[in-house]
Image (spheres, rainbow, N blue to C red):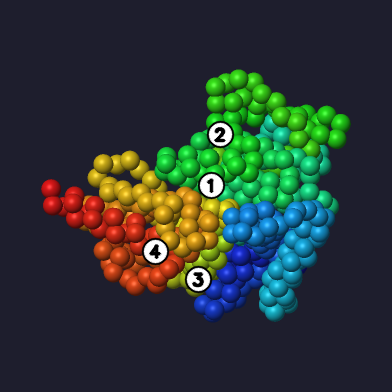
């Protein structure tokens, strides 16, 4: 077996792994990047980008159908499913290619292909051919779709985000299990592309929203596009010729069944940790095999090993994965040279769902704590939203009694921009008064956020005057 040494070994060449490798190199460490394939990052290959391409096609179809609102008569809209998916794959492959081109710029001696497993807390074996000794290692192996037990055995009728974008044509009908970000995005996009969609979730929240008013409005809005069941528990499934029959119970416990052409499992993703032999490292592992780690430094308890991105399941979104990769790479270089790791403050939590209307959650989670000041506003009469015919949904913000903004949830137009304004304000520790004093151009959808902030300033003032 060939022997090699490095300061930092990075396992996985996705968003977190690439960032970790580059950060370690920038810190002066000898770094090696190990990838088992296929490469290209989860976001580019099976996540953010292909899903947004599908959503873009669905929105084009929806806009054509809804043009009558503006006095524009569209005679008819037909969907060429094969053409839709062909463009999704073509553009997806372009994004993946750009990532792979970036990997090719890494020196060949710093790249290794193959399956890595730990031999101990300071060495790895790659494909039983190379023993790699390291000063510190970064686990950035990403994640894979979870397939619930009741869906096992459906063969090619079972889809996940790893296989969905490879189907040759749109299915006639589709059941979507899970109403989180992925499930709700795909359910609405498929429905607007002419697929008969039934979506089920065992919980009550939708698109990550938890504030009761927004959740109920989201349920009403999305039910206009597809059939939606909350508090539904799938108990089994079976192949019936060229279709699938799902067996489930509704919120009242009544047995139901649904026949569809295919089923999409959108029940989340699990870290790719199997095969790493983490038991050999001496790390403290939970019942799922996940190491105990510090979410700020990303250092695992028990060994000079760090874990970043989807592999640690803490905040599985790309901007967090890239930042975690940088932190892990810098701290791995520090550990390898005998220096203590840095423990930077985490960014405010930020998650978005690119449905129409969009949804977002920012900062601290919703809580009915009486000590919080909560305001709710709606887009129904917001000028720009009414102009464009997208005046649905609302904004909910919460703050501490001293006026310090804590978080919020949104459902509506341009939420992808409004949420980032709130996230940046949280990062800077702004009060609602300071946010309200920022200029807002007229007429923009940002004025909807300004209205919510004005009401919050008034509420804070009222609370403190009592």
What is the C-alpha distance between the residues marked 1 and 3? 34 Å
Q: Which one is closest to the eye, mark 2 or mark 4? A: 4
Using the image, tell me which numbered label, if any, was put on residue 230.
2
Q: Residues within 10 Å of mark 3 (few under 14, many from 20)?
A: many
User: Disc 2, disc 1: CB below 8 Å?
Assistant: no
Task: Give percent across and percent down for residue 205.
Answer: 50, 40
Identify the residue position indicated by label 4 in the image: 447
User: Disc 4, disc 1: CB below 8 Å?
Assistant: no
Q: Assign the N terminus to one quadrant of the image.
A: bottom right
Identify the residue position indicated by label 1 in the image: 207
Q: Which one is closest to the eye, mark 3 or mark 2? A: 2
Q: Residues within 10 Å of mark 2 (few under 14, many from 20)?
A: some
* Mark 4 residue element: helix
Earlier in the chain: of badge 1 and badge 3, it is 1
Identify the residue position indicated by label 3 in the image: 330
Earlier in the chain: of badge 3 and badge 4, it is 3
Task: Give percent across and percent down for residue 452.
Answer: 34, 56
Q: Which one is closest to the eye, mark 3 or mark 4? A: 4
Task: Give percent across and percent down for residue 19.
Answer: 58, 70
């Amino acid at each position: 077996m060939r022997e090699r040494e490095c300061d930092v070994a990075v396992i996985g060449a996705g968003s977190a792994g690439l960032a970790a490798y580059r950060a370690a190199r920038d810190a002066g460490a000898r770094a090696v990047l190990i990838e088992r394939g296929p490469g290209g990052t989860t976001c580019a290959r099976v996540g953010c980008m292909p899903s947004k391409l599908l959503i873009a096609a669905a929105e084009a179809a929806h806009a054509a159908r809804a043009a009558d609102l503006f006095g524009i008569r569209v005679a008819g809209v037909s969907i060429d499913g094969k053409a839709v998916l062909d463009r999704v794959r073509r553009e997806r492959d372009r994004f993946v290619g750009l990532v792979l081109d970036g990997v090719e710029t890494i020196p060949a001696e710093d790249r290794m292909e193959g399956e890595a497993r730990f031999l101990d807390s300071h060495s790895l074996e790659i494909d039983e051919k190379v023993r790699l000794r390291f000063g510190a290692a970064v686990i950035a192996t990403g994640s894979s779709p979870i397939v619930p037990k009741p869906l096992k055995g459906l063969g090619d009728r079972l889809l996940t985000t790893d296989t969905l974008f490879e189907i040759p044509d749109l299915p006639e009908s589709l059941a979507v299990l899970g109403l989180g970000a992925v499930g709700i995005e795909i359910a609405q996009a498929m429905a607007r592309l002419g697929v008969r969609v039934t979506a089920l979730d065992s919980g009550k929240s939708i698109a990550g929203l938890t504030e009761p008013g927004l959740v109920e409005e989201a349920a009403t809005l999305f039910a206009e596009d597809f059939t939606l069941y909350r508090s539904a528990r799938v108990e089994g499934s079976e192949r019936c010729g060229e279709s699938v029959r799902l067996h489930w119970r509704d919120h009242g416990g009544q047995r139901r069944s649904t026949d569809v052409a295919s089923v999409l499992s959108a029940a989340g993703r699990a870290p790719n940790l199997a095969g790493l032999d983490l038991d050999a490292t001496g790390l403290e592992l939970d019942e799922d095999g996940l190491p105990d780690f510090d979410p700020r430094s990303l250092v695992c308890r028990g060994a000079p090993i760090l874990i970043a991105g989807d592999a640690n399941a803490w905040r599985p979104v790309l901007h967090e994965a890239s930042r975690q990769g940088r932190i892990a790479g810098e701290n791995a270089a520090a550990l390898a040279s005998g220096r203590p790791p840095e423990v930077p403050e985490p960014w405010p939590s930020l998650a978005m769902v690119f449905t129409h209307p969009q949804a977002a959650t920012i900062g601290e989670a919703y809580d009915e704590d009486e000590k919080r000041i909560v305001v709710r506003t709606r887009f129904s009469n917001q000028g720009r939203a009414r102009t464009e015919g997208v005046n649905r949904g609302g904004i909910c913000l919460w703050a501490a009694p001293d006026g310090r903004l804590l978080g919020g949830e949104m459902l509506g137009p341009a939420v992808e921009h409004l949420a980032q304004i709130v996230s940046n304000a949280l990062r800077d520790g702004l009060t609602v008064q300071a946010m309200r004093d920022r200029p807002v151009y007229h007429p923009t959808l940002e004025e909807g956020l300004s209205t919510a902030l004005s009401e919050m300033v008034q509420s804070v003032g009222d609370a403190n005057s009592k």
